[in-house]
Amino acid sequence: MKAEGKVFKYGDNVDTDVIIPARHLNTSVPSELAKYCMEDIDADFVKKVQEGDIIVAEKNFGCGSSREHAPIAIKASGISCVIAATFARIFYRNSINIGLPIIECKEAAKDIEFGDQLKVNFDTGVIENITKNKSYQGQPFPEFMQKLIASGGLVAYVNKNIEQGEKDEL
Amino acid sequence: MGMTMSQKILAAHAGKDQVKVGELIMADLDLVLGNDITTPVAIKEFSKMSVEGVFDKSKIAIVPDHFAPNKDIKAAEQCKLIREFAHDKEIENYFEMGQMGIEHVLLPEKGLVVSGNLVIGADSHTCTYGALGAFSTGVGSTDMAAGMATGKAWFKVPSAIKFNITGSMNEWVSGKDVILHIIGMIGVDGALYRSMEFSGPGLKNLTINDRFSMANMAIEAGAKNGIFAVDEITLDYVKKHSKKEYKVYEADSDAEYEQVYDIDLSKIEPTIAFPHLPDNTKTVDQAENIKIDQVVIGSCTNGRLEDLAVAAKILRGNQVKKGIRVIIFPATQKIFLQAMIKGYIETFIKAGCVVSTPTCGPCLGGHMGILAAKERAVATTNRNFIGRMGHVESEVYLASPAVAAASALTGYITDPRKVTVK
């Protein structure tokens, strides 16, 4: 799996309340949520984002609430991948479960700037910065999570296990 | 090698004698929780799974508390959806208005969580039940759906940070001040992916209420869970509220911790988290001359009877400063009733506060107390992110019920030791 796009860059501790403010949580329709994505931290995001673009942030991206609406809004806005130095754990888990590719890479998070053009390979974790002519090695997913993503997220994974009668295996 | 308390609970629920840090396990769940924000998404995912019904009708709890009582038509539709799902799947622990309360206060009160349980909830503050010596953690809606379908969830076994608690707290200091102090010390990602384990001789000086407030905010340090060693105080609470079988897990004496912090309760001062992160803390003496517009006392962090008792003690016979709006929301119907019987509600109303039905409303800027641009609130809630309680230019200062009540009397952030209790 690969992605290519331009970067929206943010700092530390981007929380789920700015990714999708609670006032918009009276719906769970992805296209509706996407209209307000990043609204409280970057009012221009929705106007400027294009299919395939990439969010790069520093540490603890997605901290705060458990709302799956946050990765859903990001994915529905057209973002192909989120790169951060670290992710908050519930956001990390939710992204895997809904199939939003994310990569942890401290070096990339520090070096990449707003508007840079990136190419990302999820299988290897390699992030190429076309603008700066540099590359970074991100943390690829552990094998179990790659299996989970490859089977199309947690729902497909659960169904496959139920059909095969091997619920307990990872 | 020895295991931490969290690791032992995970191992037992995965049918293993031993687990190690980083290991991925599939574990059996004792309870799966959802609310009116997260359950609609879970229902959509659940409907895609090849199962007829839920894994166990008695082990799922659904609580409409965030935008309930319904704040608008869209919220009403979401609440209707989860009500119908609960009815259709014969979920035993669906709590309609009249029985409901803020989920993390309600579930222990109803005896649905006991020591040794493994709980997931589609709400980040699910970590609250660690106060009872349970492993409980917040997840998203898809995990909730898979939990409802299979009774299982995957976990990566966490490492842990130990907090060795000693001493006892001074007057007007509470568990809220202790946890704000700890978050200020380690940062909002200080416990990322890890367990926060609380033990030590000072635990006997922390009430179950203090422990609920502390475990509740473990997520605010990024933790996977916060958990307290089980003692007499825990078992008193558990036995009083539940007939469920509990199990006491103790950390091994040779358990490994990434870090160990000593926390002397007698050194903790009333502590405030300034905007816009819970780790931006200062002691109350450094928070002078901060004018406020609103005070919120309640939430899953501080909406219990003991919290209301502290607020009532300060507000009794006093008047809220003119121009300051004070909203008090007891966390459950039972707490509301007890507060009424004890005279706290009368105290609040006579002092000039409004008392709300149980809801998460104002804490997450949902409804019932939204802030306008440039307005400031002192709140006993758990997050002060940008726009958390309303306008992006509003500000939230997190504090204990004592600081919040004292501030209501002056209109400024105020040290409870400086107000006159009548």
Image (spheres, helix red, strand yellow):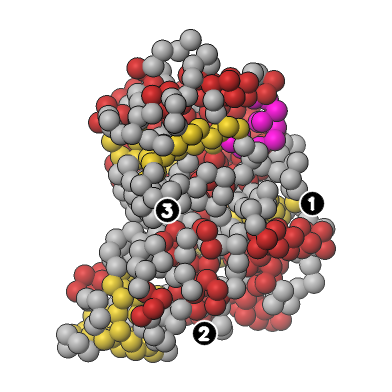
Q: Which mark is residue B221?
A: none
Q: Is residue A77 above or below residue A61?
A: below
Decide which of B296, B5 is in the foreground and name it.
B296
Residue extending farthest to the top is: B422
Decide which of B5, B284 is in the foreground and name it.
B284
Nearest to the eye among marks 2 and 1: give it: 1
Q: Which mark is residue B92?
A: 1
Span highlighted in magenta in the image: B329-339
Decide which of A44, A6 is in the foreground and name it.
A44
Asked whether the residues under marks 1 and 3 belong to the same chain, the reply is: yes
**Residue denoted by label 2:** A150
Looking at the image, can residue A72 be seen?
yes
**Residue denoted by label 3:** B391
Whether residue A97 is in magenta: the answer is no
Q: In the image, residue A105 lies at what x, y percent?
A: 29, 72
Chain under numbered label 3: B
Q: CA distance from mark 3 to mark 2?
A: 40 Å
Q: Earlier in the sequence, mark 1 or mark 3?
A: 1
Q: CA distance from mark 2 to mark 1?
A: 36 Å
Which SS class for mark 2? helix
What is the three-letter code of the residue carrying label 1? Answer: Glu
Q: In the image, residue B179 lies at what x, y percent?
A: 40, 37
What is the three-letter code of the residue carrying label 3? Answer: His
Quadrant of the rendered image containing residue A27: bottom right
- Please rate how many residues cluster around mark 3, counting C-alpha atoms within 10 Å: few if below 14, some from 14 to 19, many from 20: some
Chain under numbered label 1: B
